[in-house]
Image (cartoon, rainbow, N blue to C red):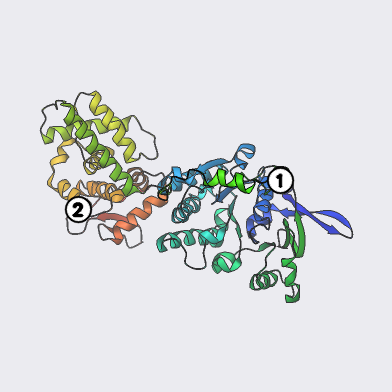
C-alpha cells in the first residue's frame, strides 16, 4: 500500500497536477509550517490530518479548540485539558501511545500558563512511554510559538522551561521514539531556534514582514529577490520544500477538507441590513445597569497540593457537620482506631487488585464509605495517616508495626517532603526498616498514583537528590540496596522490576 497522501495541487504547463506527501518520509523528517494569521495554516494541518487519519496515529495539541470537529468523523479522542490534572494528562498520554489512540488535547478553556504546563505534561507522557509502545505517531502542534517561545511572555518561567523542554524532546529526540513533529507557527522569529531547526520539510505561506520573508526564502533555498513572492500568496497557497514533498521549492494550493473549524469561515453579511443609529442605541445602551467589571474565572488543571488541600477541607467540613448533628462516636482509643483503619485499607486495596495505580483521593473515598458502613462514625484520619496506612497495606505489614518507633520517626521525616512524594519515601522507609528488598519501580508508581515507571524513577531520583535516601551500588554499577541517611535503616538487595 502506498504511503503517499494528496496534499493539494499545482499548475504545470497550464494543467493542474496533484502534489503528494510521502507519509513514511514525513514521519522520519518532520514538518514546519509558517504563515501569518489567515494564511491557511489550520486548513493545511486539517487537510494533512484528514488525509493521513487512516494511515497513522495522530496527536493534536490544540490551543484554540479548532480541531475538535475531527473527533466525530475520524474517531479521535477529545481531551479537555481543563478537566484533568497534570499527572492525569501525563498518564493519559502514556495510555494513548499504549493503545494507539488518536487524540486531541483541547486547551481553549485553560489560561496561557496552564496551557504550557498541560502541553508539557502531555508531550512528556508521549516521550516517556516505554519502548514497547514506540509506534509511529504524527504529533501536530498548532501555534507552536506559544509552546516553544523564543523569548519571554505572559507566563511563568517554570512553565516556559517545561514546555520548551517537551517541545525540544519532540523535535530533537522524538524520531527514535516514533514521534514525528508537525509544528505550525505565525512567525519563525517567535519560535525557539533549536525546535525549528530540526524540521527538514517546510510549507511557507503568506507573510508580510521583510525579515520573515527573507528567512522563509533562505530556508527554501530561494534567491532573496524572490522573497516578495511570500507577500503575494493567496490564502491556502504555500511554497513547499523537503524530502517528503519536493526536492526544489514547489507552489502548492492546499486541497479541500471534509471537516471545518467550530468557528467556521468569516462571512460578509449580504442580506441582513445593519441596525440604524436609533435601533443601535436601544439595543446597546438602554438600561445599562452594571456597576463593575465581571471577574473572569480561568479553568486550569489542579495541582497535587491543591487536591490534597481540598481533601483536607472536605474532611474538616464533614467533621463539623457530624459534630453539629450530635452523632455519637464509637469509643475507641488511638491505637484501636489505627488498627481498624488499617484493616479497612487492606479491604479497599483487595477490591482493586490488578490496578496499575490507585490515586489517594479514590482510596480515601472508598475508605470513608467502608468506615461509615461499619458504623464507626467519622473516620477522623488525616491524609498523612491514611497515606501511611496505604503504604503498610501495600507492603503486607501487620498492625503491630503501627507503634514501631522507627515507623513513627519515618512519618515525621516524611512531613518535610512535598505531599505527593511522602508516600514514596514512606514505602522505601518501611522496607528499609524491615530489612526487606527495596520496592520495585512498579510499586513506587502504584503508591505515587501513576502507571508510569519513568515517573516513578524520577521520584526516586528526587529523593536521592534531596538526601532522603542513598542508593548503594555494586562494583559493576548495579543498584544493590537503598539506605536512609542518619539512620541504620537499609533495604535488602534491590528487587528488579
Look at mark 1 in the image and give the residue it sits on: 257
User: Going 31% across and 49% down the picture, which residue do you hit?
Assistant: 305
User: Going 36% across and 61% down the picture, which residue do you hit?
Assistant: 477
The span from disc 1 to disc 2 (Cα, nearest Å) is 59 Å
1 or 2: tag closer to the N-terminus: 1
The picture places residue 352, in percent across and down from the top left corner, at 35, 32
Query: Is 254 placed left or right of 293 in the picture?
Result: right
User: Going 64% across and 55% down the picture, which residue do you hit?
Assistant: 27
User: As rendered, which of 34 and 281 lies closer to the eye?
Assistant: 281
Q: How many marks?
A: 2
Res. 488 image quadrant = bottom left
Look at mark 2 in the image and give the residue it sits on: 413
User: As rendered, which of 492 and 360 lies closer to the eye?
Assistant: 360
Secondary structure, mark 2, is: helix
**Residue 363, numbered label:** none
User: As rendered, which of 422 and 12 lies closer to the eye?
Assistant: 12
The picture places residue 321, in percent across and down from the top left corner, at 21, 31
Q: Nearer the viewer, mark 1 or mark 2?
A: 1
The picture places residue 87, in percent across and down from the top left corner, at 40, 47
The picture places residue 299, in percent across and down from the top left corner, at 43, 47
Does residue 39 lie above or below 335 as drawn?
below
Whether residue 13 is visible to the viewer of this picture, yes or no, is yes
Secondary structure, mark 1, is: loop
User: As rendered, which of 277 and 76 lies closer to the eye?
Assistant: 277
Callout 2 environment at 10 Å: few (<14), some (14 to 19), or many (20+)? some
Q: Quadrant of the N terminus?
A: top right
Query: Is 84 placed left or right of 386 in the picture?
Result: right
Whether residue 379 is visible to the viewer of this picture, yes or no, is no
Does residue 203 lie above or below 118 as drawn?
below
Callout 1 environment at 10 Å: few (<14), some (14 to 19), or many (20+)? some
Amino acid at each position: 500500500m502506498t504511503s503517499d497522501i494528496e496534499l493539494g495541487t499545482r499548475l504545470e504547463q497550464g494543467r493542474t497536477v496533484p502534489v503528494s506527501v510521502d507519509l513514511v518520509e514525513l514521519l522520519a523528517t518532520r514538518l514546519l509550517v509558517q504563515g501569518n494569521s489567515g494564511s491557511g495554516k489550520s486548513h493545511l494541518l486539517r487537510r494533512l490530518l484528514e488525509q493521513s487519519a487512516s494511515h497513522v496515529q495522530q496527536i493534536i495539541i490544540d490551543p484554540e479548540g479548532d480541531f475538535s470537529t475531527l473527533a466525530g468523523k475520524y474517531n479521535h479522542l477529545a481531551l479537555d485539558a481543563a478537566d484533568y490534572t497534570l499527572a492525569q494528562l501525563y498518564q493519559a498520554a502514556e495510555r494513548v501511545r499504549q493503545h494507539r489512540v488518536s487524540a486531541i488535547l483541547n486547551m481553549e478553556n485553560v489560561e496561557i500558563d496552564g496551557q504550557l504546563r498541560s502541553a508539557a505534561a502531555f508531550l512528556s507522557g508521549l516521550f516517556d512511554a516505554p519502548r514497547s509502545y514506540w509506534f509511529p505517531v504524527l504529533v501536530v502542534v498548532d501555534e507552536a510559538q506559544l509552546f516553544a517561545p523564543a523569548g519571554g511572555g505572559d507566563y511563568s518561567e517554570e512553565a516556559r522551561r517545561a514546555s520548551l523542554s517537551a517541545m525540544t524532546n519532540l523535535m530533537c529526540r522524538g524520531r527514535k521514539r516514533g514521534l514525528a513533529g508537525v509544528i505550525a507557527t505565525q512567525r519563525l522569529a517567535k519560535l525557539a531556534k533549536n525546535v525549528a531547526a530540526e524540521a527538514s520539510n517546510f510549507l511557507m505561506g503568506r507573510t508580510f514582514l521583510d525579515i520573515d520573508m527573507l528567512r522563509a526564502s533562505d530556508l527554501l533555498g530561494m534567491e532573496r529577490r524572490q522573497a516578495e513572492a511570500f507577500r503575494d500568496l493567496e490564502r491556502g497557497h504555500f511554497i513547499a520544500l523537503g524530502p517528503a514533498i519536493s526536492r526544489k521549492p514547489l507552489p502548492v494550493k492546499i486541497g479541500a477538507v471534509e471537516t471545518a473549524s467550530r468557528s467556521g469561515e468569516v462571512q460578509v453579511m449580504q442580506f441582513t441590513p445593519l441596525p440604524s443609529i436609533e435601533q443601535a442605541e436601544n439595543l446597546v445602551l438602554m438600561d445599562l445597569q452594571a456597576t463593575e467589571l465581571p471577574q473572569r474565572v480561568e479553568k486550569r488543571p489542579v495541582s497535587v497540593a491543591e487536591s490534597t488541600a481540598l481533601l483536607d477541607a472536605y474532611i474538616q467540613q464533614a467533621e463539623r457537620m457530624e459534630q453539629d448533628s450530635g452523632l455519637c462516636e464509637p469509643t475507641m482509643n488511638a491505637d484501636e482506631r489505627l488498627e481498624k483503619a488499617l484493616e479497612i485499607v487492606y479491604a479497599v486495596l483487595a477490591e482493586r487488585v490488578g490496578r496499575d495505580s490507585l490515586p489517594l483521593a479514590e482510596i480515601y473515598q472508598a475508605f470513608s464509605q467502608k468506615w461509615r458502613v461499619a458504623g464507626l462514625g467519622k473516620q477522623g484520619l488525616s491524609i498523612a495517616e491514611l497515606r501511611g496506612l496505604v503504604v503498610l497495606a501495600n507492603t503486607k505489614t501487620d498492625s503491630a508495626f503501627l507503634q514501631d518507633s522507627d515507623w513513627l520517626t519515618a512519618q515525621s521525616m516524611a512531613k518535610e517532603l512535598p505531599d505527593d512524594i511522602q508516600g514514596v519515601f514512606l514505602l522505601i522507609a518501611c522496607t528499609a526498616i524491615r530489612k526487606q528488598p527495596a520496592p520495585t519501580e512498579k510499586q513506587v508508581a502504584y503508591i505515587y498514583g501513576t502507571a508510569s515507571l519513568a515517573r516513578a524513577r524520577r521520584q526516586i531520583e528526587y529523593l536521592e537528590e534531596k538526601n532522603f535516601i542513598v542508593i548503594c551500588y555494586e562494583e559493576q554499577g548495579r543498584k544493590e540496596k537503598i539506605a536512609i541517611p542518619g539512620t541504620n535503616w537499609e533495604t535488602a538487595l534491590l528487587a528488579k522490576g
